[in-house]
Image (cartoon, rainbow, N blue to C red):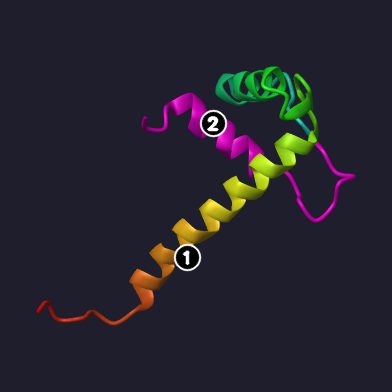
C-alpha cells in the first residue's frame, strides 16, 4: 500500500515534535492549513497525540515519531550522498 496524501500529512506532523524533550508539544492553530488540522485530528483519533489540535505525543506516538524521523533522515541522507558522491561509471 503506497503512502496516501493523508498519511504524508500525518508523517509531516509527527516529525515536527522535538524528541529531545518530552516536555514540548505542538499546537495546530485554527488558521493552519486544513490538511495539517485534519492530520492532527487523525493522529489524535489513532492515539498518537494527546489533543485533537496537537498537544504531546503518547507513548505510541513517540515511537511513531521516532520511526518517522529516522526514515526521513535515512532518505534525505541518501539524497545528500548521491548529490555529493562522485559519479561511478556503469559496468
Residue hosting label 1: 77
Height in image: 82 above or below 29? below
Marks 2 and 1, the one that precedes in the sequence: 2
Which residues, given as a range, are shown in magenta?
A: 1-25
Query: Can residue 16 be seen here?
Result: no
Height in image: 5 above or below 69? above
Residue sitting at x 58%, y 55%: 70
Residue sitting at x 82%, y 38%: 25
Tell me residue 86's x, y (percent): 29, 82
Q: Circle 1 sits in a helix, a strand or a loop, which is it?
A: helix
Q: Do the residues labelled 2 and 1 touch (CB within 8 Å)?
A: no
Check residue 6 for magenta coloring: yes
Which quadrant holds residue 91? bottom left
Residue farthest left in this picture? 91
Q: In this view, does 47 lie to the left or right of 91?
A: right
Which quadrant holds residue 5? top left
Q: Which one is in front, 57 or 85?
A: 57
Residue hosting label 2: 9
Amino acid at each position: 500500500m503506497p503512502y496516501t496524501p493523508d498519511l504524508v500529512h500525518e508523517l509531516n506532523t509527527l516529525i515536527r515534535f522535538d524528541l529531545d524533550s518530552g516536555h514540548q508539544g505542538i499546537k495546530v492553530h485554527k488558521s493552519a492549513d486544513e490538511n495539517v488540522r485534519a492530520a492532527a485530528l487523525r493522529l489524535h483519533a489513532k492515539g498518537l497525540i494527546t489533543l485533537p489540535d496537537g498537544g504531546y505525543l503518547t507513548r505510541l506516538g513517540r515511537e511513531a515519531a521516532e520511526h518517522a524521523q529516522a526514515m526521513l533522515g535515512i532518505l534525505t541522507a541518501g539524497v545528500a550522498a548521491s548529490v555529493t558522491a562522485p559519479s561511478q561509471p556503469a559496468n
